[in-house]
Amino acid sequence: MPKIIYLTPDGIRHEVEVENGYSVMEGAINNNIDGIVAECGGACACATCHSYIDEAWIDKLGEMDDMEDSMLDAAYDRKDNSRLTCQIEVSDALDGLIVHVAENDT
């Protein structure tokens, strides 16, 4: 299984295995990663799974669609490497992905 590395705002590093086909958000929820709130359950309707993708990985992800882009406009402190983790599907190609969890509970 691919390993996803979540770096939470409090500086804690969580390296967890996430099953292929799950979203990066589901991997966080299933492993009790603080900061990924996911109020909408992964429907791309709330931006509470907002995170910053490590620059080394951003080009390895697929393009975001218009719905994700629009929802990110509602996210706190959007940056160029912002993504909604509910929209990133885990695959072997993402083994080692580094996700910087945003401040989603503010």
Image: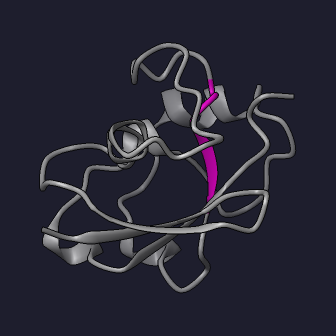
- State the scheme by which the image is colored: one colour
Query: In the rendered structure, which segment of residues is drawn in magenta?
Result: 47-52
Q: In the picture, which quadrant includes the C terminus?
A: top right
Residue 85: give x, y in percent of width and height.
47, 44
Check if residue 10 falls in the magenta segment: no
Please tell me in which quadrant of the rendered image residue 87 appears: top left
Q: Taking 69 as reference, is 46 above or below it?
A: above
Q: Is 5 left or right of 74, judged from the image as shown?
A: left
Q: Which of 44 and 18 lies nearest the eye of the viewer?
A: 18
Q: 93 or 31: which is nearer to us? A: 31
Residue appearing at x 37%, y 75% in the figure? 60
Q: Nearer the viewer, residue 90 or 72?
A: 90
Residue 86: x and y in percent read 41, 36
Residue 16 place in picture, x, y as percent: 34, 64
Instruction: Report the residue that reaches farthest toward the bottom.
Output: 56
Left or right for 64, reference 82: left
**On screen, 93 above or below 28?**
below
Number of numbered discs on residues: 0
Q: Which residue is drawn at 59% across and 28% down?
A: 37
Point out the image quarter for the N terminus: bottom left
The structure residue drawn at horizontal position 35% and vertical position 80%, both measured from the top left corner, is 96
Q: x and y percent of residue 98 in the render?
A: 50, 73
Q: Is residue 50 rendered magenta in the image?
A: yes
